[in-house]
Amino acid sequence: MATVNPIVPCLWFDTEAEEAAHFYTGIFPNSRISAISHYGSAGPRPEGLVMTVEFELDGQPFTALNGGPEFTFNESISLQVMCSSQEEVDAYWSKLSDGGKEGACGWLTDRFGAGWAGNPIGLGVSPHDADLVYSTDSGRMCPVCRKPIAQFVCAKANAGAAAPSDGIVRVSRETKGRGGKAVTVVRGLGGDAASLARLAQQLKTACGSGGTAKDGVVEVQGDHCDKVMALLKAQGRIVKRAGG
């Protein structure tokens, strides 16, 4: 007996269902278009227009429906891609955002308006895995370069990257040495210099403030602790308030 998938997401388009299906199946491995149906003379849309496209992305079935212009995608729902490496994250991010729009904190909207979500370093890598320090017979291992922490290969290869953390992101409000002005400081993010810079930009945009990413620490000008913590928690990170 054939296996029946209990849940098949249906994506509503105006007239772009077939174009979108070709776009998505061209990005993910083990993907295909399995069936296309068209509107007939009974309508409700013009006869011959593609009505539905059944397709698979890496084995997961989807249906694309040309339902009309009444409904469009929004940020309340998105698709998450689980990746095994930073290279894979970057590859999917580049392809899915082509012709679309990059959003805050790992979200993007593709060229058809559909949302794709991940964590601060892009799409899909588990935020907990991104911060873990593994222990082996060789001692504590960096999760990025898979080398002993003592060698600190990633720190040499990625200037400005964060050292592996304990998996907890700590957010604090600091004013000392800053002329009395408040700064929101985020520590314990993990990841390389590029991913930290990307996250810093996302947080700055979300908070409407300036900021920096340096030596594994992200700073956002102003007191935005609550907003920053909410954004990071929404991505699945373990977040704690620290300091003042």
Image: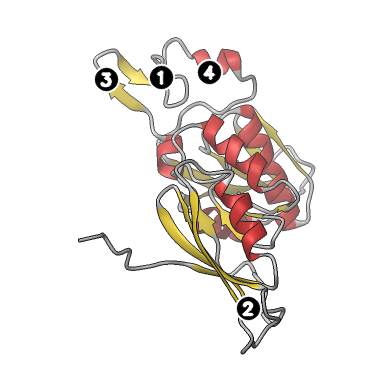
- Marks 2 and 3 sit apart, C-alpha to C-alpha, by 54 Å
Alpha carbon distance from label 4 to label 3? 18 Å
Residue at point 53%, 38% (across, down): 189
Per the image, label 2 sits on a secondary structure element best described as loop
Q: CA distance from mark 3 to mark 1?
A: 10 Å
Q: Secondary structure at mark 1?
A: loop
Label 2 to label 4, Cα distance in Å? 49 Å
Q: Is residue 104 left or right of residue 236?
A: right
Task: Name the N-terminal-most of marks 2 and 3.
Answer: 2
Measured as percent of width and height from the top left, residue 120 is found at 57, 45
Element at label 4: helix
Observer-nearest residue: 182 or 113? 113
Q: Which residue is mark 2?
A: 67
Q: Are marks 2 and 1 in contact (CB under 8 Å)?
A: no
Task: Specify the amino acid type for callout 3.
Answer: Thr
117 or 206, nearer to the observer = 117
